[in-house]
Image (cartoon, grey):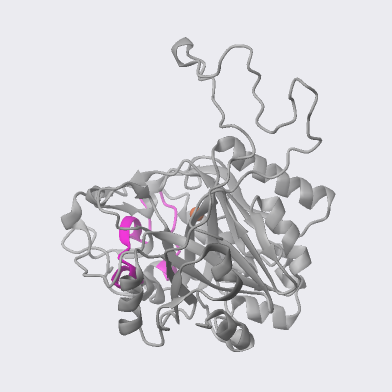
Amino acid sequence: MNDKEMLKRDLDLFESINQGHEEHLKGSESLPSINPLTKAKDVAYVRFSVPDLNLYEDWIHDFGLKIIYKDKNVIYSRGLGGDGFCHVVHRGPAKFLGFALQLKNENDLNILYKNISGCTEPHIIPGIEGELCGGKRVSFIDPVCGFLIEAVCERSIEPLLPSRSRLEYNYGDKDLHRRPANQLQDTSGNRSADGNNSIHPGPPDVIKLGHVVLAAPIGIHHKMMSFMMETFGFLPTDSVIFESPKSAAGHAVNPQIFEALKAAGPSPLYSNTKSKDSATYAAFFRCDLGEQPTDHHSFFIISNMDKRMGPKGAGIQTQLSHASFEVSNLDDVWRGHMQLKTMAEHKNKRYEIAWGVGRHVLGSHIYDYWHDPYGHVHEHMSDGDKITRSFGQRIHSISGLGPNGHNQWGPTVKESGIRNLDGPAAASFYKNFDHETQQSLVNRDLSNVKELISTIRSTV
Ligand SMILES: [Fe+2]
């Protein structure tokens, strides 16, 4: 089977319908019995390096992040909320470097230092990063995939007000008329009565980094799930399994994927259920905040069998599937879509739709995924589920997800961009990059960013 056929089979997978089941394992006792080193509170930021910071600055603006510091080597950006900058881009080879998590306190940082090989000592965040939002930090290179992982605490930044007042919607039912009479809906600041209208509505306000998603080779995906649960206390919210390569409706799930997943062994997420012999394809993880509601997922791992996602001859490597940023509502998701689309169409920007707009089944959020100018997917999301510890976890047969392209509404199976979330080589313009850039983007080896990484990890 050639690669093209393989991708088509992958899409068929989302079309398959059989008697797949959903299992809800309720309560804390259904969660993996792990005594984690720490419990992350949230994700904090993502780090990239790119050769052309000027080009990338436009992307940051058009996506809706606010730049709080820039010089010729780096740009720091934030949302309205969060604990500090949530997006960093350095001048350097095109690459996703890694991500940071928020921890409770210095004690947690110390636990990581003592237990994780190569972890720095807890230190006050030095330089401009410390000046921007304070805080303390440790960092290490994760032993499973090779990302730079940072853990921070005590960062803070003043929240910003949204550029527009919160929208009220008219629900069509006379008892649900939330928007007062004579108040004209103005979702984009371009129809005010005093004529003070903007010509272009512009990007939405990003609120914060929502979640980080990795697409890992089969086998590695289980190891990374275990590592993140054991190190940062992540809890599985929803996982997706394959039970059979053939559905009752006759649609084939790619048998190679099924066999490879089976060979990866038992899931680290659950045991003693009817799903225990199944193969785990992907899992959404939330932070363990006890009974305080938290995002349905702050971290997510999906398995990656896409041969484009590795350096030539070296096999598939773990990729950033996407970094997701929360916006206020459906209008803001669409506003982001229009900003990126119009900039691509009218200003020739290297932005490309990956998948959207739609509403997911798992997590329930409204989504819109775009490749940035180097192919890394950034998502605008809104209205996701909030979950507590006692929710337990749910297990879904992939074939139970329905025929609608894995959506509550949105693009059909045919229009699905799910394969675009495998990594940066999915962008159509990837083929135009020179060999070195391509290899840097899909290779987890850090040798071409060695100096940059050591500067970032500096403790003074
Ligand atoms: Fe997402």
Residue 392 falls inside the magenta stretch: no
Compared with 186, 143 (above or below) is: below
Residue 8 appears in view: no
Q: x, y percentage for residue 297?
A: 40, 54
Question: Taking 254 as reference, is 190 left or right?
Answer: right
In which quadrant of the rendered view does residue 115 lie?
A: bottom left
- Please check the rendered image and state whether residue 234 is part of the magenta-colored stretch, yes or no: yes
* 303 with respect to 31 (left or right): right
Q: Nearer the viewer, residue 81 or 357?
A: 81
- Whether residue 293 sits left or right of residue 12 in the image: it is left
Where is 97 relative to 240, above or below? below
118 on left or right of 418: left
Point out residue 383 in the picture as x, y percentages from the top left corner. 47, 40
Q: Which residues are magenta?
A: 228-257
Quadrant where the N terminus sits is bottom right
Q: Nearer the viewer, residue 289 or 385?
A: 289
Residue in view at x 27 percent, y 69 percent:
268
Task: Indicate whether 220 appears above or below 103.
Answer: below
Q: Residue at x 80, y 49 (%)?
A: 345
Q: Nearer the viewer, residue 182 or 9?
A: 182
Q: Is residue 204 in sight in this rendering?
A: yes
Q: Nearer the viewer, residue 84 or 244?
A: 84
Q: Position of residue 455 (x, y in %)?
A: 59, 83
Count of numbered marks: 0
Whole-percent x and y of residue 422?
A: 54, 65
Residue visible at 52% across and 81% down in the picture: 457
Residue at the spot x=33%, y=78% of the render?
Answer: 110
